Image: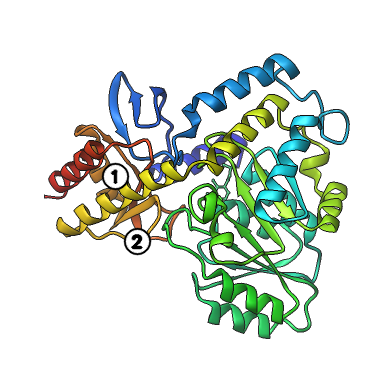
Amino acid sequence: MSWQQRISLALTERREKQQFRQRCVSQQGDVRTIRVNDRGYLNFSSNDYLGLSRDARVIAAWQQGAERYGVGAGGSGHVTGYGAPHQEVERELAEWLGYPRALLFISGFAANQAIIAAMMQKNDCIFADRLAHASLLEAASLSPAALRRFAHNQPEALAKLLAGSADVGETLVVTEGIFSMDGDSAPLAELHQLTLRHNSWLMVDDAHGIGVTGEQGRGSCWQQKVQPELLVVTFGKAFGLSGAAVLCSEETADYLLQFARHLIYSTAMPPAQACALQAALHAVQQGDDLRARLQHNISLFRKGAAELGLELLPSATAIQPLLVGEEPRALELAERLREKGCWVTAIRPPTVPTGTARLRITLSAAHREEDILCLLEALDDANS
Ligand SMILES: *Cc1c(COP(=O)(O)O)cnc(C)c1O
């Protein structure tokens, strides 16, 4: 088989399974709305939970940072790419979340890849929640360690795996704080008790919890009073930017600086972005009113959906998936909602397990009450 044949075969298979993915061009938007093919929609697909991507303070910090430091870091952090803005925001993050150290990464995907690759060796074992994010599972399966997945949010299932791991090397338990496709929270205290008992480490990816939940938006771990050995927070969601950080001990940070290749062989985050990140962090810390507005929108939506008899997953977070089941039905529903001016994404396998296609509705503090009511009405129409 030639390269051409391999590629066209793979594409044909995707098309036949109706799993062909295409991007659409978003022409403009203001968090609340999105414009595609010259038509405006209410946007219920963004992870910008607090609306900070358009926050005037954050934009100004980025602009001032660019004027002062230029637009690029000019090198890896190990060469000349690590500047005062990076150092300051790392210090503030560590202090805010109660850890000795924080290290910035260019993205959450990169952070997960880098950490798992640097930590895991042959004979080690990763125990991951079955629904953990692709960036975690992908990193785990690429690592020399064995990967075992445990039933979603079932500490008893993890306990069995840990009990049987006496003769392997080090073990790392991996979970999300709030699950990206389901919106539910991990039982972090129970998971951490288990890892402590078995000399294992816990790694929590709190991409969807940070900024949104816990006192001052400190996330799922703070809320559940758990301090995992490795906490990954990302800035592409509630922070409205992009990038990520790992929170850890002094020694773990020094270790990652030696062995995490994404930190060594990749250009550092632009310093202007680190300036914007610091402004976003302050906005998150002072964001109780934004979080209250988001909570209000969540309650309004769930109450309305219950009245309409819609089957929502049990999520108290900004992620409100509507379980549909079969893919064609999910695609059709998403299309109908678009006709009514609501942009909602259908999430299909392989992103979620077969037979659990869903509409992933995300709410933001930027939505107004009338937007939520409009979505509910569109859902009611589309379903009938
Ligand atoms: C979005 C997401 C990531 C990836 O983060 P990026 O910064 O977008 O690369 C990692 N983990 C989870 C759980 C996510 O939802």
Q: Quadrant of residue 353?
A: bottom left
Q: Are marks 1 and 2 in contact (CB under 8 Å)?
A: no
Say which of 296 and 103 sits in front: 296
**383 left or right, relative to 263:** left
What residue would you read off at disc 1?
Answer: 331
Q: Residue at the location (51% across, 66% down)?
A: 186
Q: Residue at the location (26% across, 55% down)?
A: 302
Which numbered marker is on residue 172? none
Q: Residue at the location (50% across, 43% down)?
A: 10
Q: Position of residue 58 (x, y in %)?
A: 56, 27
Q: Position of residue 352 (x, y in %)?
A: 43, 56
Q: Secondary structure at mark 2?
A: loop
Q: Secondary structure at mark 1?
A: helix
CB at disc 2 and ligand 1 closer than 8 Å: no
Q: Position of residue 148 (x, y in %)?
A: 62, 71
For label 2, count other residues whose C-alpha is less than 10 Å away and answer few (under 14), some (14-19) or many (20+).
few
The reply to whether residue 29 is visible in this rendering is yes
| Count of numbered circles on the image | 2
The reply to whether residue 5 is visible in this rendering is no
**265 left or right, relative to 172:** right
Q: Quadrant of the N terminus?
A: top right
Asked if residue 310 is positioned above or below residue 244 in the image, the reply reads below
Q: Position of residue 42 (x, y in %)?
A: 29, 32
Q: CA distance from mark 1 to mark 2?
A: 13 Å
Which numbered marker is on residue 355? 2
| Type of amino acid under label 1 | Leu
For label 1, count other residues whose C-alpha is less than 10 Å away and answer few (under 14), some (14-19) or many (20+).
many
Q: Quadrant of residue 12?
A: top left
